Image (cartoon, helix red, strand yellow):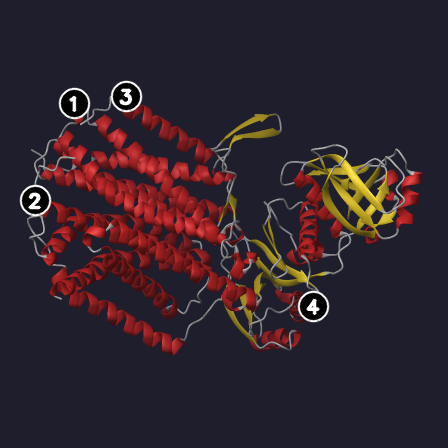
Amino acid sequence: MKRVSKPVFFITAIIILALSYFAIFGFTTQYGDIKTTVIKGINDIRWGIDIKGGVEATFKPAGDVDATDEEMEAAKAVIETRLVSSNITDYELYADSASDRIIVRFPWKEDEKNFDPEAAIDEISATAQLTFRPGNSYASTDVDANGDVVYKTPTGDTEQILMEGSNVKSASPAIDQENTGNYCVALNLKDASVFKNITEQYLNQTVSIWMDDIMISAPTVSSVISNGEATITGTFTAQEATDLANKINAGALPFKLETASFGTISPTLGASSLTAMAYAGIAAVILIALLMIIVFRLPGFIATIALIGQVGLMIATVSGFFPVFSSFTMTLPGIAGLILSIGMGVDANIITAERIREELRGGKTIDMAIDKGSKNSFSAIFDGNVTVIIVALILLLVFGPTNILSGIFGQSTTGTIYAFGYTLLMGVISNFVMGVFASRLMLRSVSGFKPLRKKFLYGGVGK
Amino acid sequence: MNNTTVQTAPRRVIDFVGKKKIFFGISLAIFAVGIICNIIFGTQLDIQFTGGTIAKYSYTGQVDEEKLKEVAQNATPDNQITFSISKNMLAGEAASDDDYIVSLQFTGTDSISFEQQKAVTEALNKAFPDNNFEYSESSSVESSMGWKFFLKCIVAVAIACALMVLYVTFRFKKIGGLAAGMMALVALFHDVLIIYFLYIILRMPLDGNFIAVVLMILGYSLNDTIVIYDRIRENRKTLGGRTPLGELTNISLTQVIRRTILTSISTLMAVACVFAVGIIFNLDSVTRFALPTMVGVVSGCYSSIAIATPLWVVWENRKKKK
């Protein structure tokens, strides 16, 4: 057997425990009142509305309107702007162009006492007011979901309305012909004379574009436009140009939005019961640890460290601990995925420890037993985990953004089950890292310590 | 890998395969009870799948139930209302004995409109000004969307099952891959049916949680079956082809039974902790999820040992006779 040097155990164990500590508790620094989250911990997990409570609503065009894809995107842009202006940043929003539905979900905010979901839904789906105003002054600012600053509330110059959104025929993203590589937004106007007057009056000045009370763009008029075809140029990326065009189109939507379905889930699992769930998690880990240590002794102890590492790693993948994985909305099915992965992780350790015990009772030395036990148990662990990966991938593909069945069922059927696939996949990967690799590494290292070289400690019959 | 050591059979081999009739009998008996309950109770689908509306309101003090129904009914004349009243025991709130929750279900598969929903809230507040009727939660789903979601879940499960069987077929070629895969699938159906019947017997409507539990148990149960197959595959290699299939299987099962039980106990303990918290804090959504999961874990463990493996032995033996 290839020996693993003794310090490896301590190094691995310390890395695992440190990782788990930071994954659970996070790391924040505080300068005066400003708290900066350096590492995201368990408190930064976003809980889905099935756990934390929240609002879910589906909107559709009123009447028998068959909306185009562009119109649906524009309607979605309206809702998105509204959510931001109502200070709701933690939302999920889908537009399903196949069935003309827009679905929005958002959880209750912290300390929400008198939130009226019915009023909020009314507000979100109201018809958008697009206006063109002189200047670019604003009275307040806000921060959107991406951390960008949002300028709100017209004041001074901007209280005057030059043109309403109803005069916009369409807006579309385009490539800037003069300034290659940049994108711009092309505006097509209904009544060219109104816009001609504006551009004459405010030549070389700023005219801002607002949706409701949010400023979405503040271009400078660079020439008089008399043919009703304007372009807004700037350093737009393709995405930014599309977003802006969608918002402008929203002000010119030919239909109203109607609430097709509406649901609220009371915050049953409020902050206090989330703490209770955390206790359940801790109790489960302690019980499993006791069982493992009593039944398997030394390998059981190592399995416990690996299990803590697996839990830490899984929390890290949902809380946004690693910059590559953005934080993830945890739902009840997501918790099901966590439980199954922990089960699989415990199982990997049990299979290996059982095998080592069997080999020892068959008369092998400790080194040989660890070697053979690890080798012989790998295929079972591998096959079991691969089948689970298959399930996880199917769920991610079907219920995630890729939505491979959208051709049959439409996009809006994307739901909470996505979280199950995600936590399961991350759990199985964590299982290979911790339950298989780290656990075996530590066991081999520990078996080098003289006082620990007793068959009894590995589940053999004591002599 | 040098395989010079001969795998020794365990001293006491438990005769699992010989007891297959008892095993199959137990499962069939449970199914029979389930089917009878299903006929009596019928299958309830949550409005998540069928479409429809449920609205819940909290209130304090005593309310004339007939009047309550009448008020709600008058607010939505087009929909028949069924309703139930329960004690309000929301977590984290100091709920007194006087706090209740009324849950109104509007029959019909279409969601009632948002405006109608608001009308009910207003009507209740007007009729019972002293009882602090407060809108607590609601869900309403369009029937077409609900069905799509349900069908999509079923298709996703079917695809996942098909791929898992393919994988087992491929990996366990040496022990009659396709048969092994199909029998594993039978065991999965067994588990899904057990969970389904549990929902029927407890009269819980099938909802998104049901799908989550089923998916979880599919993964769990198949893992159990694979661990057993893996041992049979290995023993076939080390014990040689001379050992009769039944005995080979019994040896393998005896070797892995400790692992299967320990893993199941661990998982069961973890879920039981969640279940206990759900009970203590009266978190409906959690207990409704944890209970079927616990039953599923037991069923998944049982079906691998008592259904998939003996069935596979029967199948392989019959193939040999031909």
Horizontally, residue A122 falls left or right of residue A43, namely: right
Marks 2 & 1, CB-CB < 8 Å contact: no
- Give the residue pinned by disc 4: A64
User: Are tags 4 and 3 found on a single chain?
Assistant: yes
The residue that disc 1 covers is A450
Q: Are tags 2 and 4 found on a single chain?
A: no
Judging from the image, mark 3 belongs to the subunit labelled: A
Q: For residue A66, which quarter of the picture?
A: bottom right
Q: Is residue A112 left or right of residue A292?
A: right
Q: Nearer the viewer, residue B88 or B49?
A: B49
- Which residue type carries mark 4? Asp
User: Mark 2 vs mark 1: same chain?
Assistant: no
Name above or below for residue A171 compared with residue B111.
Answer: above
Q: Earlier in the sequence, mark 1 or mark 4?
A: 4
SS at circle 1: helix
Q: What chain does mark 1 sit on? A: A
Q: Position of residue B89 (x, y in %)?
A: 49, 58
Mark 4, chain letter? A
Question: Type of residue at label 1?
Answer: Lys
